Image (tube, rainbow, N blue to C red):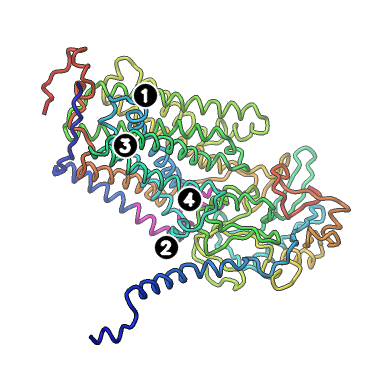
Amino acid sequence: MTAKPQFRALDGRSGGYYGLLGILVVVIGLGLLAAVLKSAHGHYITGMDNQIVWGLPHVFAIFLIVAASGALNVASIASVFGRTIYKPLAPLSGLLAVALLVGGLAILVLDLGRPDRLVVAMTHYNFKSIFAWNIFLYTGFIAIVLVYLWFLMERRMNRYAPTTGMLAFVWRLILTTGTGAIFGFLVAREAYDAAILAPLFIAMSFAFGLAVFLLVTLAAYQWSERPLGDLILRRLKNLLGVFVAVVLYFVAVYHLTNLYATRLHGVETFLLLEGGIYPALFWVGQILLGSLLPLALLFHPVWSRARKVIATASALVILGGLAQLYVIIIGGQAYPLDMFPGFEVSSSFYDGVVVPYTPTLVEFLLGLGGVGLALFLVVVAIKFLHFLPVSLADHKVDPHHASRTDTVTASAET
Amino acid sequence: MSQKTSAPISRRQFITGAAAAVASVTIAPGVFLMRPADAGTAEGVRWGLLIDSNRCGDCNACVTACHEENGVRGMDRPRTDAQWIRKVELRDPDTGHSHSLPVMCQHCEHPPCEDVCPTGASFRRADGIVLVNKHTCIGCRYCMLACPYKARSFIHETLTDQAAHAPRGKGTVESCTLCVHRIDRGERTTACVEACHDKGNGAMLFGDLNDPDSAISRELAEHGGTAIRADLGLNPGVRYQGI
């Protein structure tokens, strides 16, 4: 019989722990400083303007929000699909989901023109707006996952965990659909206005969330010197590879559909060939470095055994994801609106031209601050609560494993 | 003891009273907001513009007049300066023929900005004018992404010296109001239309699209007109001729 996984909080007294915490506090501080500067001077100190209304902060924010719902996957696989091997990792998965979402939302709120009116957003709703739905989807997600975590970690409530896990899983699918629909529902812009953006965002969330989860798990176990077996890592890295491939599939269908429609040839040429930074980010950032290279690394029979390779592949998936969101969010706005089909247009308001966008340090720091906040929450939570299993050695996660292989000894027992 | 005499209300009464007070304070603003936001607008009216691109000259009179009227001043930062109305030059690459026309908020019957606005700050009055409620706009700019006409601007810096009838505030979104302050005063023209007329072009016409006897309706009935991006089915209140 399999023993219940033992969880224990980190000691968190080492110089390394406090060093990490210190760095994250500084990053959060810089993010807040950026928000204060932007608030005091107005958005003109950023690279955003009346044409590119959403910029680099939104790339970070939407990455975090999309990754948040994906980070919950490991818990979902355990609770919803009954794979017990993932069970020990379920609490960390839920924690990461909440932390990433909070980080992303913090960026979004601080980038508002009037962040002080957050209470207005909480009291005035226009239910035709996908944004208004998202306010409910995001806060609901946090609430459901917190309850789910409680049920997972409180022995008396364990029996309710699968039902709550199912609710959280369905909710996260709707949530990411909502995030994709922010763009999918924009009828006037050629790069958006596509229902496939919703499933594409769901696939992206699977990949980005798992990549972040893998990196955090590897770091947490390496730095706390707790045993982490290859068995669980091998499963997770294979899963990451599958998710990356699924994203590629949806990206291919999106572009092929657009390429079939003559009226969309302009925007496709822009995004794939002639748009300067956007095709470069697409082909080199998203496809080559963010998809093909990680796929090769994750499925290479020899390389993929090394943890550094798995970590590198995860980091590449994250960078590729940021490149992908940059192309979707900013590339989609940079391409001019086709208000007068068949005419060449020009105006003092940048009609008919590709709008330039250069992100500024303020935007970068604001985005990074959100990432810092998400990681800060994780680092603090695993010190004070029992999120991390004491051991993820192969024989701990799968009791049958030791009988199948000779490589594992019981020496990792604590 | 003296407490007893000086506090004739019981605890229950106090709590009930306090609850009632809190409730009234909470509900009161709502009650006052129940007053139709468009008081002063006539029922059954739909204000609109008709722009004849063939008569539209090389001038910028409509733009200057609008921005003067509404206190929209540039900061010499073209990327972030607000433009409530702009002149767009069109050139047919096949024939080389070119002409220009002003583009502003098209005051759609089904405005995408209103659809996407999370707080309901973007709204359409009963008389068809699409506005931004400056008190509830949180500055998310989703409406700017959704607008097919790029008609909206975001205020990127602190503003001073505003026109009293056109409040503007840093961090909120704004666009053409169809000179709503004039309409609510009973005037039946906008700054841009007036300027175009004074300039002698007469390319712009303001009026009630729902009144078959109005000049704008008669002109549309006689010579027709089209909407920009008519394919989107938004039924804009601004119509064009000669595109």
Q: Which residue is mark 2?
A: A40
Task: Give the amino acid at mark 3.
Answer: Tyr
Local secondary structure at mark 2:
helix
State the CA–CA distance, disc 1 to disc 3. Answer: 27 Å
Residue A38 within the magenta-colored segment of the rendering: yes
Nearest-to-viewer mark from 4 and 2: 2
Taking the view exactly as shown, the residue that stands out farthest to the right is B222
Q: Amino acid at mark 2?
A: Ala
Q: Which residue is mark 3?
A: A160
Nearest to the eye among marks 1 and 3: give it: 3
Disc 3: CA contacts within 10 A as few (<14), some (14-19) or many (>=20): some
- Percent across and percent down for residue A149 are 29, 40
- How many residues crowd mark 4 within 10 Å: few (<14), some (14–19), many (20+)? many
Q: Position of residue A131 (x, y in %)?
A: 51, 48
- Disc 4 marks a residue whose amino acid type is Gly
Q: Chain of mark 2?
A: A
- Residue bounds of the magenta highlight: A31-54
Q: Residue at x 35, y 52 (%)?
A: A31
Chain under disc 3: A
Amino acid carrying mark 1 in the image:
Leu
| Image-quadrant location for residue A38 | bottom left
On screen, residue A231 above or below B230: above
**Which x, y percent locates residue A304?**
31, 20
Q: On the image, which quarter does residue B106 sit in?
A: bottom right
Q: Counting residues from the N terminus, which is met first, the one under dot 4 or under dot 2?
A: 2
